[in-house]
Image: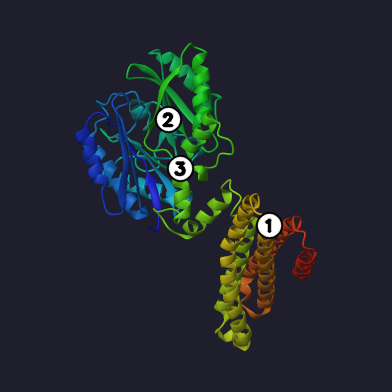
């Protein structure tokens, strides 16, 4: 799948399952996948989460809005949640292979089509907004269906982005936009006093001086006061911090959180953050989670591919709170990438008319780079294995008569691997520099990157060499290693 976009349309119906089933059927098509649907009786609202390819999900959203317009009449709709449309809000969220700007373009296309096909006026919000005031959904939805109906034709500030200044008689207006991932998070208090929930919501929401990236309101839901929130950037204002503030503010009025709920889906990272906070796990890292480690070891993300999927497992292994792989493996990887870039540049110039006079030099460079690149790729694992052997040697030495010799042998191998990496990286850098005058000048930046990566590999590898030498007592071996290292530095 080349592109992956999430769409989370909200519909003003949370009580009639038959109607929601019909809307879901309108969404279904090749390339679109239903992840979740949530129906709330008190809010009288449904949230549907789908993901799919860019073009397919655009059409799915348009069809869903049309079906909602057939089935939902806002003139008779009653519920706790504010609303202005049968299909109230339709956000697009970038997942893979698309940017937020791409989702803005999608929102504008979908908005135009909704008016064209169904005569439902459309407002753009969040990243797709045409004015700063319309970035915030609450500003657009002020007064809800009834208030907007009274003002849309007389107040220029309420003119829609697509369509005429009049509401659809039963479906109202729809808000379409593009945004980051949002967590719909509600906290129930142990009281039916909705005024307490409203006071807590005012304290926590950003618009009235509370927490950044938090929108909040108070409702009476299932006989309990509910603080209903949207967290628009959970990485900057995490869910556990929001819960703690709700708890603290509620205590001022003699209330406590009874439970909380998530409407729709939540990123795994948000729950990992909460686990770290509440459990106070020392040195917590997402790679400590079994499923995360398995995914990294067995090839990265399953849902989508791409370049990131190839490199991400190794990066996550480096990030893990374990001693290996470490700087030595990272140095070998840097040098291998440098060799790869130099190979690409040489390959794209060899055989071209402008560089025929350099055919021999380019061929020689490619042959040597291919060999060195394979050796460096193997060194990524060799370095980690050498470090593991050192750890085993220290364990075995406790019960061995020749313990010092066992440790020395392991340390020598752990020194030779990064030393070889440094030597190979130096050769890669030299080849890359020689390629500059005999290859396409438009690829100069690639060779500059190759040299920079090779130099970083040299610095990292030699740092690993030096730290191992501190524990070695074989004067002859130490001297030879220092001699070779000095040649690399030249």
The image quarter containing residue 184 is top left
Tag count:
3
In the image as oriented, which residue stretches furthest toward the top? Answer: 254
Counting residues from the start of the chain, the first of labels 2 and 3 encountered is 3
Q: Quadrant of the C terminus?
A: bottom right
- Crowding near the residue tagged with mark 1, few <14, some 14–19, many ≥20 C-alpha atoms within 10 Å: few
Q: Which residue is mark 1?
A: 402
Q: Secondary structure at mark 3?
A: loop
Between the C-alphas of marks 1 and 3, the distance is 64 Å
63 or 388: nearer the viewer: 388
Q: Which residue is mark 3?
A: 179
Q: Which is in the foreground here, disc 2 or disc 3?
A: 2
Against 360, residue 80 (above or below) is above
Residue 122's spot in the image, x, y percent?
36, 40
In screen coordinates, is 469 left or right of 307? Answer: right
Between the C-alphas of marks 1 and 2, the distance is 62 Å
- Crowding near the residue tagged with mark 2, few <14, some 14–19, many ≥20 C-alpha atoms within 10 Å: many
Residue 135's spot in the image, x, y percent?
48, 37
Q: Which residue is mark 2?
A: 185
Q: Secondary structure at mark 2?
A: strand
Residue 368's spot in the image, x, y percent?
61, 78
């Amino acid at each position: 799948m080349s592109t992956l976009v999430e769409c989370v349309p909200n519909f003003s119906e949370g009580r009639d399952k038959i109607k929601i089933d019909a809307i879901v059927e309108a969404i279904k098509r090749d390339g679109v996948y239903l992840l979740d649907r949530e129906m709330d009786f008190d809010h009288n609202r449904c949230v549907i989460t789908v993901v799919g390819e860019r073009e397919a999900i655009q059409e799915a959203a348009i069809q869903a809005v049309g079906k909602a317009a057939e089935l939902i009449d806002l003139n008779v709709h009653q519920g706790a949640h504010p609303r202005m449309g049968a299909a109230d809000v339709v956000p697009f969220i970038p997942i893979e292979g698309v940017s937020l700007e791409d989702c803005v373009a999608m929102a504008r296309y979908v908005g135009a089509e909704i008016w064209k096909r169904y005569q439902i006026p459309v407002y753009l919000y969040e990243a797709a907004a045409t004015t700063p005031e319309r970035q915030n959904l609450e500003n657009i939805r002020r007064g809800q269906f009834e208030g907007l109906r009274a003002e849309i034709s007389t107040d220029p500030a309420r003119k829609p982005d697509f369509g005429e200044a009049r509401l659809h008689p039963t479906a109202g207006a729809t808000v379409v936009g593009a945004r980051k991932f949002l967590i719909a998070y509600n906290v129930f208090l142990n009281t039916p006093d909705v005024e307490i929930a409203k006071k807590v919501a005012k304290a926590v929401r950003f618009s009235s001086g509370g927490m950044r990236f938090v929108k909040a309101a108070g409702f009476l839901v299932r006989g309990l006061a509910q603080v209903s929130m949207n967290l628009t950037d959970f990485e900057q204002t995490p869910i556990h911090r929001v819960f703690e503030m709700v708890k603290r503010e509620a205590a001022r009025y003699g209330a406590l959180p009874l439970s909380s709920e998530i409407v729709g889906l939540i990123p795994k990272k948000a729950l990992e953050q909460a686990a770290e906070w509440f459990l106070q796990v020392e040195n917590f890292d997402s790679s400590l989670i079994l499923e995360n480690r398995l995914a990294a070891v067995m090839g990265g993300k399953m849902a989508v591919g791409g370049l990131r999927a190839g490199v991400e497992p190794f990066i996550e292994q480096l990030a893990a709170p374990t001693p290996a792989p470490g700087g030595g493996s990272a140095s070998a990887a840097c040098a291998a990438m440098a060799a790869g870039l130099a190979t690409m540049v040489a390959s794209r110039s060899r055989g071209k008319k402008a560089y025929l006079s350099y055919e021999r030099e380019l061929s020689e460079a490619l042959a040597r780079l291919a060999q060195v690149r394979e050796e460096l790729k193997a060194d990524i694992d060799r370095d980690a294995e050498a470090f593991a052997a050192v750890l085993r040697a220290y364990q075995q030495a406790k019960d061995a008569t020749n313990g010092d010799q066992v440790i020395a042998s392991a340390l020598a191998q752990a020194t030779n691997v990064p030393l070889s990496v440094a030597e190979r990286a130096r050769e890669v850098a030299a080849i890359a520099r020689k390629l500059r005058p005999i290859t396409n000048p438009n690829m100069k930046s690639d060779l500059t990157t190759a040299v920079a990566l090779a130099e970083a590999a040299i610095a990292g590898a030699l740092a690993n060499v030096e730290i191992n030498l501190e524990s070695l007592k074989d004067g002859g071996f130490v001297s030879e290693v220092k001699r070779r290292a000095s040649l690399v530095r030249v």
